[in-house]
Image (cartoon, rainbow, N blue to C red):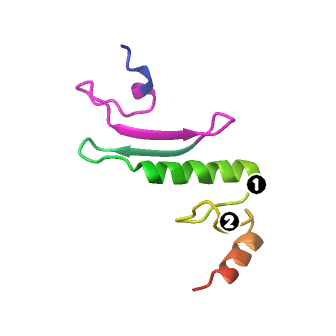
Amino acid sequence: LSKRISTDYGVLLEDGVALRGLFLIDKEGILRHSVINDLPIGRSVPEAVRVLTALQHFEEHGDVCPANWHEGDDAMKPSAEGVADYLAKHDN
């Protein structure tokens, strides 16, 4: 047991215990999302699925997913104009 992955991702503590880490890597091998929790804090599976779905949406459509985005919600084009259009439509 080499613990290489936990070492490479910076979650291995000096005593050999790994922190709770979640890393989403895109099709090109680019790290797109990471969260590292201390030992007493658990991860959220629904949040991990939401972020994975947002990444897949981006990869398929090229749209940017705003905060708290869920599948089926509007996304925005990755430009100043796209953001302005989104904000104009969702001005609360």
In the rendered image, the vertical position of residue 80 relative to residue 3, given as above or below = below
Relative to residue 50, is residue 29 drawn left or right? right
Amino acid at dot 1? His
| Coordinates of residue 15 in the picture (x, y in percent) | 22, 26
Identity of the residue drawn at 75% across and 55% down: 62
Q: Are marks 2 and 1 in contact (CB under 8 Å)?
A: yes
Quadrant in the picture for residue 76: bottom right
| Coordinates of residue 91 in the picture (x, y in percent) | 62, 84
Relative to residue 27, is residue 45 drawn left or right? left
Q: Which residue is mark 2?
A: 75
Relative to residue 68, is residue 78 drawn left or right? right
Q: Which residue is mark 1?
A: 61
In the rendered image, the vertical position of residue 78 relative to residue 15, given as above or below = below
| Coordinates of residue 65 in the picture (x, y in percent) | 63, 61
Q: Is residue 11 magenta?
A: yes
Q: Which residues are magenta?
A: 6-31
Quadrant in the picture for residue 21: top left
